[in-house]
Image: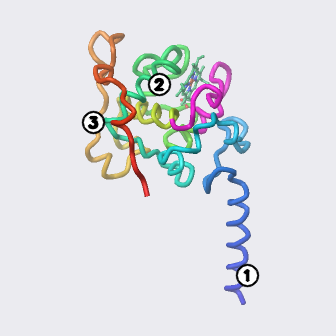
Amino acid sequence: MRKKVLLGTTLVVGLMIGVGASFGQVVFRHTITGEELQLAKALDESGETPAVKHFMRSGNNPYMGLPQCFPKGEELYLTACSACHGHYGEGKLGPGLNDSYWTYPKNVTDKGLFETIFGGARGQMGPQYGVLTVDEMLLLMAWIRHLYTGDAVDAEWLTEEQKASFTPFKIPKGGGGMPTAAAAPASDAACEISLP
Ligand code: HEC
């Protein structure tokens, strides 16, 4: 009897989560209001890449730590974010993104960081869903994580295995110049990933 009730509850909760998420199983929420993000507002291409599908299901960014995808992520970051957050995420008008301090602690997870980017935060940090596709957001998120200068211990977005081999980013002396990956051309083919 008790088992049945439990099973029933599990089913109802499961259904609620399922209905709540219009895109997949994970429910994404606005960083300030906590309201569910309207992922349907995303630019058209968003639902189509294997990486986006994987992320919507799991909340994990499959581009994370893939050097072959860095040039694209960097290009997007330099176009959409660096004017406010600095060339290397060191901070400018907007806060730094390359250290272990976060105004919104949830940004240590891929899901949280995505929510802040997609839906925006306060003031000048506007929502990016009209500017970038979800796939592009995932690519530049991987680049932002690459720019991290802090300790691997605080890098909650890394798996234990990734933490073991993580080297903090070093801002080139003199700053300002072109970051590392800029030397390699951003190629779509190089960064194609296939996921189950
Ligand atoms: C017009 C300037 C501007 C642009 C462009 C901009 N941001 Fe921001 N960003 C800000 C400001 C200002 C804040 C602080 C907002 C707040 O505290 O609510 C912020 C906050 C953030 C935060 C939260 C940081 C924390 O400490 O929790 C993240 C993450 C972030 N921005 C990522 C991005 C990314 C990625 C892009 C590019 C797609 C971007 N921003 C583009 C100005 C900008």
Within the magenta stretch, is there residue 119?
A: yes
Q: Main secondary structure of the magenta part?
A: loop
Q: Residues within 10 Å of mark 2 (few under 14, many from 20)?
A: some
Residue at (58, 32) in percent of width and height: 117
Label for residue 167? 3
Figure quadrant of the N terminus: bottom right
Foreground mark, 2 or 3? 2
Determine if the C-beta at disc 2 is less than 8 A from ligand 1. yes
Report the residue marked by disc 2: 76
Label for residue 5? 1
The kind of residue tagged 1 is Val
| Element marked by disc 1 | helix
The kind of residue tagged 3 is Thr
Give residue 92's position: percent from left, percent from top: 50, 14
**Camera-side residue of 43 and 144:** 43
Residue at (61, 57) in percent of width and height: 25
Q: What are the residue bounds of the magenta stretch?
A: 115-135
